[in-house]
Image: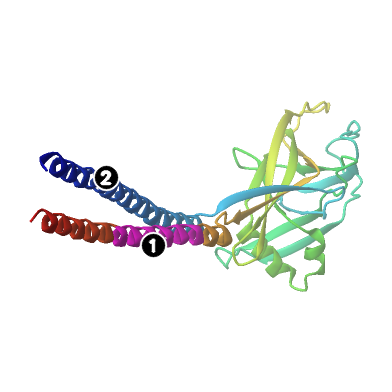
Amino acid sequence: FLPALELGTTAPSLRFSKTCLKNVFSVILLFIYLLLMAVAVFLVYQTISDFREKLKHPVMSVSYKEVSLYDAPGIAFYPGKARLLSCKHHYYDHIPPLINPGQPGAIECTTQRINYTDPFTNQTMKYALVVQGPRDVKKKELVFLQFHLNGTDQDFSAIDYLLFSSFQEFINSPEKAEFMKDCESSYSSWKFSGGFRTWVKMSLVKTKEEDGSETVEFKQETSVVNYIDQRTKPRSDQLFFVVFEWKDPFIQTVQDIITANPWNMIALLCGIFLALFKAADFAKLSVKWMIKIRKRHLKRSRQVMNHIN
């Protein structure tokens, strides 16, 4: 009778050990899935935060468009007391030698003279000489101008100029004075000095704003070469030489783009929420299974005790 009793008590002990291991394993799995749920919640928060951050800070995109002909820019000179002696279009970076420098020559450029009030003071009258710039970038078209200043009481001599995007828009404008005031308010001005040949190479940059509007800006590379005055008599006047040419056939377009893709974020969030629901469902089933195993174990324990009694 005693061996049989010992065998009967050993079998429930083995069943209890297996049940205990199953319970421990289930608890470990439950904690793992709770940890995965916490990671999924963190990923949801991080995804939404990254999306909002990308909306606040768009990325600058730069593209280039190649053209063979530019829209001829307008070059507005403010010569003051200086006088335009000659203006010619040349091609392939070739400028013939000067003939009678300092003397009036051929003016083969389209020019327009305009007077308007200073946009910053609204009191001072300004005089501008507007010249049509080069167009054909493939043939390396350039515009060569020569100015003459008879005399000046200043220590330094220079002529101001500014560039704007379209000479044709200036010609077609019914209010040319207002057009020039807007240009002076929007574009930067530069200078070139007397006694030198200033070679200006232009490039065009277009910027697209958030409201869909487009602004135009000129970038310049300038090289300066000293003019050797070979006129026989010593003179106190100043000669100004300036060349305008397109640097390359590429128009640069700059715009801000939003790299955040809402569809990618929605797909990622759907996957995360699906994993959350699956983990929650598994956790619920694991808890039910543990409760069921616990009840079954208690029931068997009561049966064994009843049998022993």
Point out the residue furthest to the left here.
309
Q: Label for residue 18?
A: 2
Q: Residue at left 33%, top 62%?
A: 284
Q: Label for residue 281?
A: 1
What percent of the width, then of the height, locates residue 74?
77, 55
What percent of the width, then of the height, locates residue 265?
52, 59
Q: Residues within 10 Å of mark 2 (few under 14, many from 20)?
A: few
* Nearer the observer, 160 or 247: 247
Q: Secondary structure at mark 2?
A: helix
What percent of the width, then of the height, locates residue 198?
73, 36
* Nearer the observer, 58 or 94: 58
Point out the residue furthest to the front here.
1
Quadrant of res 235: top right
Quadrant of res 249: top right
* Nearer the observer, 135 or 31: 31
Left or right: residue 121 compared with residue 117: left
Left or right: residue 300 compared with residue 255: left
The amino acid sitting under disc 1 is Asp
Which sits earlier in the primary sequence, circle 1 or circle 2? 2
Q: Which residues are magenta?
A: 269-289
Q: Residue at left 78%, top 64%?
A: 170
Q: Residue at left 37%, top 51%?
A: 36
Look at the image and say whether residue 275 sits in the magenta stretch. yes
C-beta proximity under 8 Å, tags 1 and 2: no
Q: Secondary structure at mark 1?
A: helix
Q: Residues within 10 Å of mark 1 (few under 14, many from 20)?
A: few
Q: Is residue 52 above or below residue 150?
A: below
Q: Main secondary structure of the magenta part?
A: helix
Quadrant location of the N terminus in the rendered image? top left
Look at the image and say whether residue 2 sits in the magenta stretch. no
| Residue 202 seen in the current view | yes
**Of labels 1 and 2, the one closer to you:** 2
